[in-house]
């Protein structure tokens, strides 16, 4: 069922059931993070491998110390400016957090989402919520309650509808091992914003075999239709080689010639990265549903949120 009733969501969660919740990034598939049975349900419903750890969501930075044993200064500084928001902190976990949540890792991922309904719900609970994105493992993340309903509607009792997610890409993940701030996933808070606050950060290169953050798995966020990521020039050239009417286009600012307009989505006519991020996953789903032979996506400039968007497009295109 889809609804806007926080009390209904709270009741299911207190019984150990799962509820899909809105956040400012993407919808989450939430369960009591301190209840192992609920955590197992999350992995089962999402068909997620157990080696891929979950983010723990809470409603205030003060509460974070209930779950973690140490908070580096740089994390505190970032939190002062960016929390609640689209940033996830990897911090040493306390034993109250089940090993299942962190896939046995000594660090737990913690995030405070900036969404009114999510925060009200979290405030009303006396436990934090473990929540991965509410999509089947490997598919595009959901940014509306309807996206969740399409794929998980028959597997969970309630979807809390908070409208379309404002940001539209997942949180930025940052860790502080050996006191070196390191980005493990590019996301809704741009690296430039983080570097303005704490100086240069390291970027963890992807490894598909033993990922630190399996959101880093090379193939992820993948539509069912074959998907190619190209710069605009190459994309326009490619249109001469294939049948334009069987092709779908995901463009940044402008439509391309020859391909029917119905097969095209433009992420942001005015060239805004935040508008592009907001539309990204919904447009990928719409194009995937057209049943075209392939989707050609245009690469964005690699700055600001363009980096997180390119990262998702690259993974969607990876075999
Ligand atoms: O914006 C978001 O972060 C959304 C919303 C719902 O909060 N959540 C989300 O969760 O994207 P998920 O599970 O789809 O992606 C979480 C990523 C995974 O790639 C996971 O591997 C990584 O966080 N992660 C979680 N705990 C970790 C840990 N202890 N160490 C390293 N990576 C971790
Ligand atoms: Mg995910």
Image (cartoon, rainbow, N blue to C red):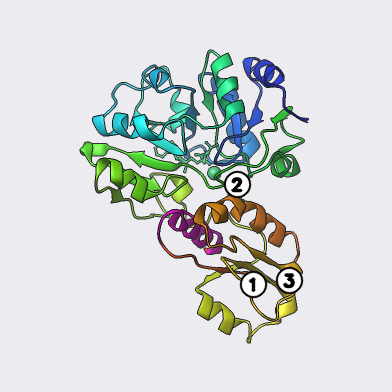
The crowding category of the residue bearing disc 2, from other C-alpha atoms within 10 Å (few below 14, some 14 to 19, many at least 20), is many
Whether residue 319 can be seen here? no
Residue 177 position in % (x across, y down): 26, 38
Report the magenta residues as a range. Answer: 303-317
Residue 142 falls inside the magenta stretch: no
Residue, disc 2 = 141
Q: Quadrant of the N terminus?
A: top right
Residue 20, numbered circle: none
- Residue 261 numbered tag: 3
Q: Does the residue labelled 1 lie within 8 Å of ligand 2?
A: no
> Which quadrant holds residue 304?
bottom left
Toward the viewer: 13 or 82? 82
Which is nearer the N-term, disc 2 or disc 1? 2
**Foreground mark, 2 or 1?**
1
Residue to which mark 1 is pinned? 255
State the CA–CA distance, disc 3 to disc 2.
25 Å
Q: In this view, does 36 lie above or below 131?
A: above
> Are the residues at dot 1 and dot 3 in contact (C-beta closer than 8 Å)?
yes
Mark in the foreground, 3 or 2: 3
Residue extending farthest to the left is: 178
The quadrant where residue 97 appears: top left
Element at label 1: loop
């Amino acid at each position: 069922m889809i609804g806007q009733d926080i009390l209904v969501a709270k009741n299911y969660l207190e019984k150990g059931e799962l509820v899909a919740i809105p956040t400012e990034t993407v919808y989450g598939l939430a369960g009591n993070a301190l209840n192992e049975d609920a955590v197992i349900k999350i992995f089962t419903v999402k068909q997620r491998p157990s080696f891929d750890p979950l983010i723990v969501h809470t409603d205030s930075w003060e509460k974070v110390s209930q779950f973690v044993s140490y908070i580096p200064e740089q994390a505190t500084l970032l939190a002062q400016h960016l929390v609640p928001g689209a940033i996830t902190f990897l911090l040493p976990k306390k034993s109250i957090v089940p090993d299942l949540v962190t896939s046995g890792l000594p660090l737990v991922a913690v995030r405070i989402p900036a969404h009114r309904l999510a925060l009200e719900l979290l405030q009303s609970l006396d436990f934090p919520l473990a929540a991965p994105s509410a999509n089947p493992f490997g598919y595009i993340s959901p940014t509306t309650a309807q996206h969740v309903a399409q794929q998980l509607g028959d597997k969970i009792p309630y979807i809390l509808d908070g409208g379309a997610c404002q940001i539209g890409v997942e949180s930025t993940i940052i860790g502080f091992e050996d006191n070196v701030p390191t980005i493990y996933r590019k996301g809704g808070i741009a690296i430039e914003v983080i570097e303005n606050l704490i100086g240069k950060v390291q970027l963890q290169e992807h490894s598909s075999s033993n990922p630190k953050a399996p959101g880093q798995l090379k193939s992820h966020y993948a539509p069912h239709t074959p998907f190619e990521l190209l710069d605009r020039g190459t994309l326009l050239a490619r249109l001469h080689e294939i049948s334009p009417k069987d092709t779908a286009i995901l463009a940044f600012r402008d439509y391309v010639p020859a391909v029917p307009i119905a097969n095209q989505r433009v992420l942001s006519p005015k060239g805004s990265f935040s508008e592009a991020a907001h539309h990204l996953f919904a447009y990928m789903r719409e194009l995937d549903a057209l049943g075209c032979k392939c989707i050609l996506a245009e690469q964005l400039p690699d700055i600001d949120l363009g980096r997180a968007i390119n990262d998702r497009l690259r993974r969607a295109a990876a075999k």
